[in-house]
Amino acid sequence: MSRVLVIGAGGVGVITAVSLWFKGESDVSLVVRSDYDKVSEQGYTIESCDYGQLEGWRPHHIYRTVEDAAADASDKGYDYVVVTTKNIIDGPADSRVPNIIRPVLERNKSLHGAQLTTHILLVQNGIDIEKDILAEFPRDEFQYTVLSGIQLIGSTKIGTGHISQVSQDYLSCGAFDPQDAVAVQAANDFVRMYSNKGHNFVEFEPRVRYSRWKKLVYNAAINTSTALVELDVPRCLEFGVGKKSTATEVFQPAMREIIAIAASEGIVIEEKFVTMFTEITRNKVFKPSMCVDRDKGQLMELEVILGNPIRIAKRNGVPTPTLSVLYNLLVLVQARLKELKGLLKFDEKTASLVEE
Amino acid sequence: MSRVLVIGAGGVGVITAVSLWFKGESDVSLVVRSDYDKVSEQGYTIESCDYGQLEGWRPHHIYRTVEDAAADASDKGYDYVVVTTKNIIDGPADSRVPNIIRPVLERNKSLHGAQLTTHILLVQNGIDIEKDILAEFPRDEFQYTVLSGIQLIGSTKIGTGHISQVSQDYLSCGAFDPQDAVAVQAANDFVRMYSNKGHNFVEFEPRVRYSRWKKLVYNAAINTSTALVELDVPRCLEFGVGKKSTATEVFQPAMREIIAIAASEGIVIEEKFVTMFTEITRNKVFKPSMCVDRDKGQLMELEVILGNPIRIAKRNGVPTPTLSVLYNLLVLVQARLKELKGLLKFDEKTASLVEE
């Protein structure tokens, strides 16, 4: 039994834990911050299109913090650390991934020195997200690999300890460094531990960067737009002029700009995905993550989804008229969310941002 | 004393009534729908940058409906009907301007036949808005002129019977048909009746269509954007990347597209207005009308501000990449507002719009 610690107990993290638990090849620990008391007492209520209705479900262990999970690892440590938190590089320091996972890496090191390899699986959006970790944890001091998880899933926490999953879990898992044989093996092992035939769909991904750009085609065009209008995808499509303009005037021009940026990086995303991603959630009355974040007053994964691609486009001279409007409007929505959370200040008397 | 009926008691309508009352050349009637009881008992509370603090202010007459105002006109009728309601051509039928003003035109006709000319002043956004009226009221049956009012003003109803005006009232008034000498004279008379030196600024506008396109430069670019992000203009400008991207990547590209559409119609809007309109509300912590409407769950003047110009652009072959994204996103926001008001229905089971 591999010991797996899942960090992040939102719609994605909980279904990740359920999938591993269901297969029965892992000892599953879950860090449940805000919902800890409820879940500790009553377990989760889950409506899942993959696993049906679960009442009172719990993984093998739950913890309130990563520190608690690290302390309780006793002498075994964790083989896998699966990070499903949002990746908000413009957010507060304690939400940065290296800071989140540090207690586990330190604990594993103190228990086993170089004997235990920690496999860090980032089930997160965006490009180059592994680089922060490589920069923060020197290889001669810590023994680890970094794995990429790309997940297409419609799953949301709709209440305390209450998860609703409406579209099938599709996970592709691979090594950020395809030359690292240990990482490649660990990714393949994870695929086996996670795969539940007839329930979810999981595969080994040899082309991580391709896979990440492909997911951006959806996220950069559709996730972003829904956040500006605060509507699910079916409504966005049906409410367009002639039931068409949202696809033809917003989603698809934006998708084609992402494909052009990827191409400028040597990654070829096939045109067929423009139609596929337009249709994929047409009948799912489900708000994508950035839309949910705006509704809930939480920061959005704007920079890894849209800021980084646009910066690459500028570097490579790729025009992005549609993405630029979406991005620069969402920068304002993000700032508004930060102001509401007290992360930035605006002085109405001088009508200016207060520099900290 | 000219008898003036002001229809619409929002931020614009009330300051319009105040301006006419202040000058003292008009007998001012105001239709106050939702706030009638409060205003009837206590009058208005107004914080105005043009007229100072007014407590308990009332025009000469107030009415709950246009029908009441028409009935009370006795044998005098109204010389001017000033319409300051929103112009929402995709809204319910009873909010269409010809339906709103019909009781006054009928009453004036029944009182005086062809002896009284009714001057209809539309203080409203948009292009071609006079055509609905010309189509609905035959000239051989009704005696009237149609005048254009273009107003730049920061004024909002912030509570029941409570108005806050933060930027100076600037009104340009002219005849939609510059060949109609009676209309031109009526517009000049209105300018005189409305002008309060040192308080507001009002001028006769010989080029109504130019003036309407010019106002669209602000409204189509800035009013629209603020509605998508739900922020006042100073925050939009200050929250941009490097405090610049909102102006350079959203507002100004959008403004230049409006200028290009106007040019395709033979109207030359000078480039200097791009800078002028970027700066005009930089220090006013004030949400433009469409932003206020979204916040309040009211329909926005989307079609006259952005839909009509984009349709003209398509007809004339003018590219509008920025405006198109803004418009097609706002179409979704408008549909969401309509759904909230019960004006359209979406069936979540079939994930489709219900056709009525």
Image (cartoon, coloured by chain):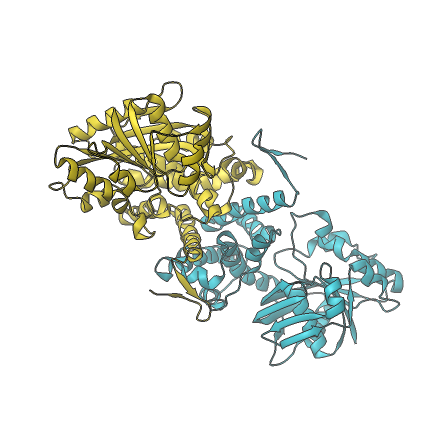
Chain colours: A cyan, B yellow
- B345 horizontally vs A346: left or right: left
Residue A57: percent from left, percent from top: 71, 73
Quarter of the figure with residue B123? top left
- Count of labels shown? 0
Q: Residue at x 17, y 33 (%)?
A: B117
Quarter of the figure with residue A110? bottom right
Q: Is residue B69 above or below residue A274?
A: above
Q: Is residue A329 visible?
A: yes
Q: Nearer the viewer, residue B210 or B11?
A: B11
- B93 horizontally vs A33: left or right: left
- B349 horizontally vs A289: left or right: left
Q: Residue at x 44, y 45 (%)?
A: B293
Residue A269: percent from left, percent from top: 51, 63
Q: Is residue B330 above or below residue B287?
A: below
Name the quarter where the N terminus of chain A is drawn. Answer: bottom right
- A145 horizontally vs B67: left or right: right
Q: Residue furthest left?
A: B140
Q: Residue furthest bottom?
A: A198
Q: Residue at x 71, y 62 (%)?
A: A35
Q: Is residue A182 visible?
A: no
Q: Nearer the viewer, residue B347 or A66?
A: B347
Q: Is residue B276 above or below residue A15?
A: above
Q: Is residue B346 above or below residue A168?
A: above
Quarter of the figure with residue A97? bottom right
Residue A83: percent from left, percent from top: 70, 62
Residue B86: percent from left, percent from top: 35, 42
Name the quarter where the C terminus of chain A is drawn. Answer: top right
